[in-house]
Amino acid sequence: MLKYRILTALVLIPLFIALLIFLPPIGFCVLTTLFVLVAAWEWSFLMGVQNKWRALIYPLIVLFLLWCAFELPLTATLYGAIVGWLIAFFLVIFYPRGSAVWGKSIIARGVMGALVLVPCWLALNFIRNVDTGIYVLMYLFVLVWIADSSAYFIGRKWGKNKLAPKVSPGKSWQGFIGELIVTLVIALATLIIFKFDSAQWLSFIILSIVTVLFSVLGDLFESMLKRNAGLKDSGHLLPGHGGILDRIDSLTAAAPAFAVGGILLTKLA
């Protein structure tokens, strides 16, 4: 399993970075739309849909919502996503308490999926279209990927105390703390290599740490839904990684948080 996980990552990461660099904004928008629609198809099974053909209905609904999202006020939508993720935090903390309200409802879990996937798609395309957006997105992807991988490997090696045993028994406090330390190292290395102004250091480090905290929440939230649905993985498309949703779960929360942080920092500058 670990071998397949590493090989898949070695193929996907360079491919995705190449697409990010060379695709024009409209091409990147189409690419992210395809990823979101596959993730929406996988989300159908978290909702309790059993039939693979019926599972195609939800991606069509999400596609319609993505189209409607062009008319939404971007900043307000991203702020709303942060509020939604803060609510998700309490759902994760208190699980399984409260799951009787949403855990058996296809509609409730479908709404959850829309509130997770649509703002993530908006955030990614918003960041892509700002000045130097390609490099900003590249930092976001590298930050989340390395932080997530470090938590996995540190947790496998030294993990003893469970972070959220009722939601994701495999995650440990040791992996989480290691992830935050790695995040700090990545942020500092970026500041030094690219010669950021010293006045930007604190805000950049805080933004990086908050982004990774949200990425952990995104991962735990999907794990909660998988546990509720009795699933180990959201899909089987990626060897060693599960489904597309399993690969982007951290990003679904990290991207809106990173985008909102960037907006706030721009206003404060």
Image: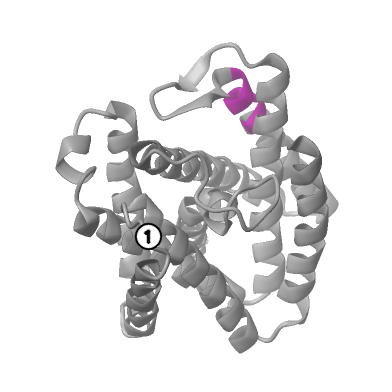
Q: Is residue 252 left or right of residue 16?
A: left
| Three-letter code for the amino acid on which mark 1 is drawn | Ser
Residue 194: image location, x then y, percent: 81, 56
Tell me the chief SS of the magenta region.
helix
* Residue at the top extreme of this rendering: 160
Residue 229: image location, x then y, percent: 35, 42
Quadrant including the N terminus? top right
Tell me the element at label 1: helix
Please name the residue shown 60% across and 24% down the image.
Answer: 177
Please name the residue shown 56% across and 81% down the image.
Answer: 29
Q: In this view, does 239 lie to the left or right of 247?
A: right
Q: Is residue 267 visible?
A: no
Please name the residue shown 37% across and 64% down the image.
Answer: 78
Residue 210: image location, x then y, percent: 51, 42
Label 1 crowd (10 A; few <14 / some 14-19 / many >=20): many
Q: Name the residue under label 1.
A: 44
Specify whether residue 34 is painted magenta.
Answer: no
Dividing the picture into quadrants, the one containing residue 15 is bottom right
Residue 236: image location, x then y, percent: 60, 53
Q: Which of 3 and 24 is in front in this view?
A: 3
* Residue at the left extreme of this rendering: 101
Q: Give the range drawn in magenta.
A: 174-179
